[in-house]
C-alpha cells in the first residue's frame, strides 16, 4: 500500500470530522495566540485525539500526527493571508508529482510571470525550471503570462509535473521535454497540410478507416488535438505520466476550437478526459480531484451517448461489448477513487465492488492468448479479439481476420480517392472557379476518341458538362486552341534542341510564359540569329526558374518529412484502430486493491 495515500486518507477523515464538529485547531484551547502550542494546548490536542481515534477507528499515533499537520496547515494559511494583505506577496502551495509527492510553500507576487515562479520551484527542487510544468484547474499555466491573469490566488494549490532525472538520465530527460515544446509546432505545421497537395500530412478517419471531410479550420484544430492526444498516449504507454498529462492538456485546448456538435459525436474527446484523469491518479495528485470529477462526468455522458448506458447501442452495432466494457471499468474505478477522496467512503466501497465484478469478467485466459499469438496475431489483437468474442478462440480469430480485411479495404479505398483528388487538382479549376475538372469525365471522353488535352480544356470551359464539352470540341475547336496551355510538340523540340531534357522542356514551357513566347518568335522569324539568342536567353531564364522552384519544393517536402517523423516517433501503430480499448488491466487491479485495503 502507498504510505502517503494512507496518511492522506487519515488526514482527510480527521479534517472532515473537525469541520462537522466545528472544531478550530488555530484557536483555544488548541492554540494560544501568545505562546503558541504549550503544554496546555498539547494536552488539549491529546484529549481530542483520544476522542477521535476510536470514533474514526484510527491508530492514536496516526491521529495525533494528522491533528498536528492540520493545525500547522491552518496556521500557515492564516499567516500567508496576513502577509498577502500587508505586502501583496502571495503564498502558493505546489504539489510536486512523484512516487512520494512533495508539498512546497513559496511566496511570490501574483503579478510576476509564471516563469519567475517556476525558477523559485527550481531552486527548491534542484530541477531546471524548463522541465517543470504547472497545472491548475485542468490547465497548463503559460510561462509568459502572469499568475494573476491565469486565475491564481493567494493560497492556491498547484500541481507541478516534472521529469525526474539522475546524471545518467539527464540528457534523455532534457530531450523528452524538448519533445513537448516541438511536438505542438510540428503537429500544427502538418495539420494545415491537405492530403491532396502534400506528401506528408495527417488525416482524420472514423473507426472503419474512412476519411472524414471537414471544414479547414475545424479539421486543423481536430487533427492537432488528435495528434497531441496520440503523442500523449504514446508517452502514457511508456509510463511517462508527466509528459503524457501535459500533452493531453494541450490536446484539450485544441479540442476547444471544435464545435460541440462534433465533439459530442465522437468518443475521442471522452477518451481524452478519461486519460487526463488517469494521469492525475498515476501521478498521485488528489489536488486535481475537482477537475477529475468534472472530466469523468463529461466522459460518462459521451460514453452513454456513443454506446448507450448499458452498451446496448454498441451491441446493436458491433454485436459485442467486451472491449468497450474495459473502458467503462476504468471509468467506474476512477469514479470510485474520486468518491474516496471526497470522503464518501460507503459510496466508494459500493463502486469498487462493482469494479471488482467488472474486472473479473474482463480477465482473459493466458493459454487462449498464446494460441492466437502462435497463429501470428499480436498481443493487442489477441486481447481485443478474445474480449469481443467472450473468450471463444475460433470467434476471436474470425473477428481479427475480418477487422484486418475491413481495414485493408478502407485503406485501399482512401488510396484510390487520394490519387483521384490529386489528379483533379492537377487538371485545374473549371471556368466557374468552384469545381475541379473531373478525371473520370476526361477518361470517358478520351474513350470516345477525343484528344486528352482538348477534353480537359472543353470540360473546364463547360464546367464538367459532358454534352457541352463534346459540342465545343466538335463545333468550336478554335476556342480550345486559344485557351490551351499545353505546349506543342514543336515547341518542346525547339527547347530540347538547346540540350534540355524533353520532360524538363515541357515543364519549362508550362511554367514560364516568356519561354513560350520566345519559341513562337523563333518559329515565326525562321530561326534568325536574334531569335536564336532570345530563345537561348529565355531558356536559361526558365531553367534557373525551374531550379529554384524544385529546390524550394524539395525543401518544403523535407521540412514536412522531418516534422512528420518527429511527431510519428513512438506513436501507437495506427493500423490498430481500437488501440485505446487494449487495456491489460494490471494497473487497474493494483489501484483497486490499494483503495479497497484503505476501506477495509
Image (spheres, grey):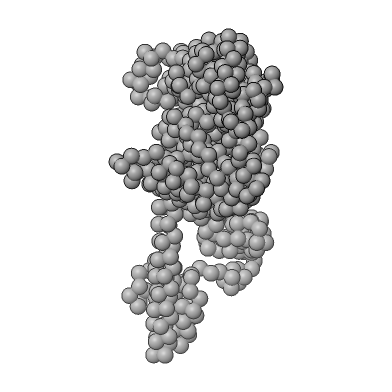
Nearer-the-camera pick, 54 or 420:
54
Position of the N terminus by quadrant: top left
Q: Give the residue displayed 49% in from the left and 79% down from the top.
A: 514
Q: Is residue 191 left or right of residue 459?
A: left
Quarter of image, res 504: bottom left
* Closest to the observer, 385 or 10: 10
Q: How many marks?
A: 0
| Coordinates of residue 30 in the picture (x, y in percent) | 62, 24
Please state the horizontal and vertical placement of residue 470, each as a whole percent of the image. Answer: 62, 59
Question: What residue is at 56 percent from the left and 25 percent from the top?
Answer: 38
- The x, y position of residue 396, in whole percent, is 45, 18
Residue at the spot x=46%, y=72% of the render?
509
Query: Closer to the camera, 413 or 37?
Result: 37
On screen, 519 above or below 568?
below
Q: In terms of depth relative to the viewer, which is nearer, 557 or 33?
A: 33
Question: Can residue 232 be spotted in the picture?
Answer: no
Quarter of the image where one finds residue 483:
bottom right
**x then y, percent, for residue 182:** 45, 50
Residue at 41 percent of width and 12 percent of height: 365
One can see residue 97 in this view:
yes
Q: Residue furthest left?
A: 168
User: Which of the 4 image quadrants contains residue 249?
Assistant: top right
Q: Is residue 479 left or right of residue 585?
A: right
Amino acid at each position: 500500500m502507498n504510505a502517503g495515500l494512507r496518511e492522506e486518507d487519515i488526514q482527510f477523515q480527521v479534517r472532515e470530522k473537525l469541520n462537522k464538529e466545528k472544531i478550530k485547531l488555530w484557536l483555544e484551547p488548541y492554540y494560544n495566540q501568545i505562546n503558541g502550542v504549550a503544554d496546555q494546548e498539547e494536552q488539549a490536542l491529546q484529549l481530542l485525539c483520544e476522542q477521535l481515534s476510536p470514533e474514526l477507528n484510527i491508530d492514536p499515533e496516526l491521529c495525533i500526527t494528522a491533528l498536528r499537520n492540520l493545525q500547522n496547515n491552518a496556521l500557515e494559511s492564516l499567516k500567508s493571508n496576513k502577509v498577502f494583505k500587508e505586502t501583496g506577496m502571495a503564498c502558493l502551495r505546489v504539489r510536486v508529482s512523484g512516487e512520494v509527492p512533495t508539498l512546497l510553500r513559496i511566496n511570490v507576487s501574483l503579478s510576476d510571470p509564471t516563469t519567475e515562479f517556476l525558477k523559485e520551484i527550481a531552486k527548491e527542487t534542484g530541477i531546471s525550471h524548463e522541465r517543470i510544468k504547472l497545472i491548475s484547474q485542468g490547465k497548463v499555466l503559460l510561462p509568459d503570462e502572469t499568475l494573476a491573469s491565469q486565475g491564481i490566488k493567494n493560497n492556491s494549490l498547484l500541481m507541478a509535473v516534472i521529469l525526474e532525472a539522475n546524471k545518467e538520465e539527464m540528457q534523455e530527460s532534457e530531450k523528452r521535454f524538448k519533445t513537448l515544446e516541438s511536438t505542438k509546432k510540428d503537429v500544427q505545421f502538418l495539420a494545415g497540410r491537405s492530403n491532396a497537395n502534400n506528401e506528408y500530412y495527417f488525416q482524420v478517419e472514423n473507426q472503419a478507416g474512412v476519411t472524414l471531410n471537414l471544414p479547414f479550420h475545424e479539421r486543423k484544430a481536430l487533427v492537432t488535438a488528435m495528434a497531441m492526444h496520440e503523442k500523449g498516449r504514446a508517452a502514457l504507454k511508456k509510463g511517462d505520466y508527466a509528459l503524457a498529462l501535459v500533452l493531453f492538456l494541450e490536446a484539450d485546448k485544441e479540442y476547444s476550437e471544435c464545435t460541440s456538435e462534433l465533439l459530442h459525436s465522437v468518443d475521442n474527446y471522452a477518451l481524452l478526459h478519461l486519460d487526463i484523469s488517469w494521469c492525475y491518479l498515476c501521478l498521485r495528485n488528489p489536488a486535481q480531484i475537482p477537475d477529475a470529477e468534472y472530466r469523468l462526468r463529461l466522459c460518462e455522458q459521451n460514453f452513454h451517448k456513443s454506446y448507450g448506458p448499458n452498451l446496448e447501442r454498441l451491441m446493436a452495432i458491433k454485436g459485442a461489448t467486451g472491449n468497450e466494457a474495459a473502458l467503462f471499468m476504468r471509468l467506474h474505478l476512477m469514479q470510485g477513487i474520486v468518491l474516496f477522496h471526497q470522503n464518501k467512503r460507503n459510496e466508494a466501497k459500493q463502486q469498487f465492488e462493482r469494479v471488482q465484478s467488472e474486472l473479473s469478467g474482463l480477465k482473459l485466459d493466458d493459454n487462449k492468448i498464446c494460441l492466437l499469438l502462435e497463429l501470428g496475431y499480436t498481443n493487442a489483437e489477441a486481447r481485443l479479439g478474445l474480449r469481443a468474442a467472450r473468450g471463444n478462440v475460433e470467434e476471436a480469430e474470425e473477428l481479427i481476420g475480418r477487422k484486418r480485411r475491413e481495414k485493408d479495404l478502407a485503406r485501399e479505398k482512401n488510396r484510390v480517392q487520394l490519387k483521384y483528388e490529386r489528379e483533379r487538382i492537377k487538371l485545374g479549376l473549371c471556368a466557374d472557379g468552384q469545381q475541379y475538372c473531373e478525371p473520370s469525365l476526361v477518361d470517358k471522353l478520351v474513350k470516345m476518341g477525343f484528344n486528352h488535352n482538348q477534353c480537359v480544356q472543353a470540360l473546364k470551359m463547360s464546367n464538367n458538362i459532358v454534352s457541352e464539352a463534346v459540342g465545343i470540341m466538335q463545333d468550336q475547336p478554335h476556342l480550345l486552341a486559344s485557351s490551351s496551355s499545353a505546349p506543342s510538340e514543336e515547341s518542346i523540340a525547339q527547347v530540347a534542341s538547346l540540350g534540355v531534357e524533353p520532360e524538363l522542356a515541357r515543364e519549362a514551357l508550362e511554367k514560364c510564359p516568356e519561354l513560350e513566347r520566345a519559341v513562337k518568335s523563333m518559329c515565326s522569324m525562321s530561326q534568325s540569329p536574334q531569335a536564336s539568342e532570345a530563345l537561348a536567353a529565355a531558356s536559361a531564364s526558365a531553367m534557373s526558374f525551374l531550379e529554384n522552384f524544385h529546390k524550394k519544393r524539395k525543401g518544403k517536402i523535407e521540412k514536412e518529412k522531418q516534422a512528420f517523423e518527429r511527431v510519428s516517433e513512438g506513436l501507437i501503430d495506427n493500423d490498430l484502430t481500437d488501440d485505446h480499448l487494449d487495456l491489460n488491466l494490471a494497473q487497474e487491479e493494483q489501484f483497486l486493491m490499494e483503495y479497497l485495503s484503505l476501506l477495509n
